[in-house]
Structures are given as structure tokens and as C-alpha cells.
Image (cartoon, rainbow, N blue to C red):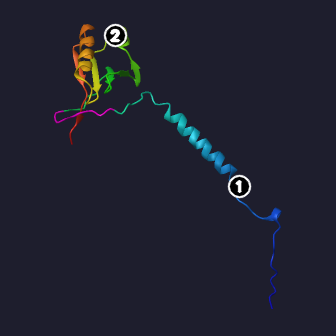
Amino acid sequence: MNLRRRVRFREEQRSYIDVVPLVDTLLAVFLFLAILAFQSPETFIALKLPFAETGEKVKLTALKIQVKKDGTYLYKGKPVSEEEIMKLLEEKKFDYLIIEADENAKHKFVVKLMDLARKKGIENVVIAVKKKR
């Protein structure tokens, strides 16, 4: 004889898992991560630097200009013109100019930057490369 009584719940009495706090928590975490992602001081553009066997790591405080494949100049991830680069060189006296040029960038764009630096008295021009492994 079965003495256990089978309990049937009505729809209002059924248990459920509330996902609203979980969604709220995940939303707060994603918001926190998004804010952190946009707080970085420099934006890095994916340039494909050429390899060199004799490269070395050097820590400098200098003006760093990137040259994209199509010849556009970037300063801190934002496009700049030659006139704006000249203003930057006039405002501060930089000891070094670091040129990060894409390996497929035309030579004339790099030479133009070097010429601008020479006109403003910067003798030390560094062309960035990746070291071969």
C-alpha cells in the first residue's frame, strides 16, 4: 500500500529561478569592462612592421608618428596632416622622432617625415621594426 501522497503544485506554487539579478550583474560587469577598455591612454593601430635581425629595445620619450600603408600619418591613433605634425614639432622640442611605418608604406612618406624633423632640428630619427625570432 502506498502511503505517500503525491503532491501536485498549482502553477502559482511552482519554484522557478529568477534570472533578473544574474542579468543585472552581468550587465554591470560588461559596463565596467567597457569603461576600462576606453580608458587606455593610447590607441594602437595594427601595423605590420617589417622584421630586422639587429633590432633592439630602447625606451625613449619622443614624438611617435605612424605611417599607414596608404600614406596617412597617425599621432596617438588619430589622423594628422603634415601641418599638424609641424605644429607638434614647434610646440615641444623633441630629441627623437620615432617612425612606425607599415612595411608596405611607400618610401616617400617616411622620407617626408624625416625631412620635416630635420627642418625642426631633430637629428635623431628612429624607424621602428620588429625583431626576428
Q: Residue at x 39, y 17 (%)?
A: 80
Q: Which residues are the magenta region?
A: 47-54
**Residue 49 has which mark?**
none
Mark positioned earlier in the residue sequence (1 or 2): 1
Tell me residue 72's x, y (percent). Answer: 35, 21
Tell me residue 11's x, y (percent). Answer: 81, 64
Which residue is label 1 attached to? Answer: 18
Q: Principal SS element in the magenta part? A: loop
Q: Residue at x 27, y 33 (%)?
A: 49
Please give left or right for residue 99 compared with residue 5 in the image: left
Q: Residue at x 73, y 61 (%)?
A: 16
Q: Is residue 110 magenta?
A: no
- Quadrant housing the C terminus: top left
Please give left or right for residue 53 compared with residue 26 in the image: left
> Callout 1: helix, strand or loop?
loop
Mark 1 → mark 2, Cα distance in angstroms: 60 Å
Asked whether disc 1 touches disc 2, contact meaning CB atoms under 8 Å apart, the reply is no
- Give neighbour class at mark 2: few <14, some 14-19, many 20+ (Cα, 10 Å): some
Which residue is label 2 attached to? Answer: 86
Nearer to us in this view, 23 or 41? 23
- Quadrant housing the N terminus: bottom right
Which three-letter amino acid code belongs to the residue tagged 2? Met
Please give left or right for residue 10 compared with residue 20 in the image: right
- Please, is residue 7 above or below residue 17 in the view? below
* Furthest residue in direction left, as rendered: 54
> Callout 2: helix, strand or loop?
helix
Tell me residue 56's x, y (percent). Answer: 21, 32
- Give neighbour class at mark 1: few <14, some 14-19, many 20+ (Cα, 10 Å): few
Which three-letter amino acid code belongs to the residue tagged 1? Asp
